[in-house]
Amino acid sequence: ANSDFVSTATRGAMAVVDGNVMPINPSEEPRQQMFIWNNIFFSLGFDVRDQFKDLGGEAAAHAAPLLDLNGVRAYWAVDQEGLYLIATVVIDYRGYRITAQTIVPGILERDQEQSVVYGSTDFGKTVVSDDSKKLRVQRHLVLNKDDTAVELCSSVEHKGIVGNDGRRYILDLLFTFPPDLNFLPVEGEDLNHVCQQLGFPKLHPHRLVCLRQELIDAFVEH
């Protein structure tokens, strides 16, 4: 079934890039347009609303879909009863990066902010009780805008949404794993003159760099 979805999503992504699918927001500029084909939602890998402005702009927007896909794989492996994911495929075609996803029932019919029941700093509620242990994520407190502490067992950017089918879905999983500090600049660190002449430090094009799940598992089990 998974291979069938990948095959269908790939055909849809090719149709989107080739201009054979009408966008659901045709008045927007092409970079911001989104598409639905065969009940699959398609979006393009551009930083259209400066969401990744502080993380590397277009380079970060290009990397984000694969990080989200890695998060989907990790939660899929957890196989937590009562927690659902949306099928996700990332396709590179003709210079475009397209994300294809199934649609959470009812999400297009209402305001997404009102649908979020987990991960939002306004509506943070626990969706799943023990996935944090399996993903090596410690429960932690975050503060919302009125300084109220909310306990989460994932990144605050993750969103839990209850669909019209009554199922609980978790979305936006690109920050599932911690950042890899080896690729991030260190404030106050000055290299010697020789290193600077050789072009160091060489900055990574974006800040969306995360540790692999295998490394985290090996570290915890060591």
Image (cartoon, rainbow, N blue to C red):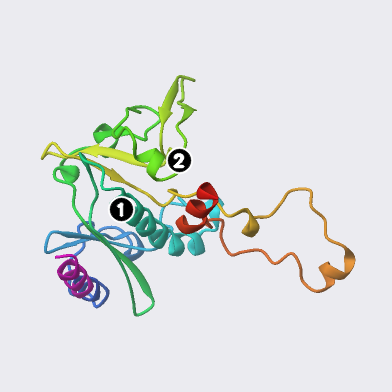
Residue annotated with mark 1? 77
Q: Residue at x 10, y 40 (%)?
A: 165
Amino acid carrying mark 1 in the image: Ala
Secondary structure mostly seen in magenta is: helix
Chain part drawn in magenta: 1-11
Name the residue at the right extreme: 193
How far from the left and from the top, in percent, is residue 105?
14, 45
Amino acid carrying mark 2 in the image: Val
Q: Residue at x 74, y 64 (%)?
A: 201
Residue annotated with mark 2? 137
| Quadrant of the image containing the N terminus | bottom left
Q: Is residue 2 magenta?
A: yes
Residue 32: name its quadrant: bottom left
In what element is the residue under mark 1?
helix
Q: Residue at x 58, y 64 (%)?
A: 205
How far from the left and from the top, in percent, is residue 104?
18, 47
| 41 in relation to 125, above or below | below
Q: Nearer the viewer, residue 51 or 126?
A: 126
Q: Is residue 9 magenta?
A: yes
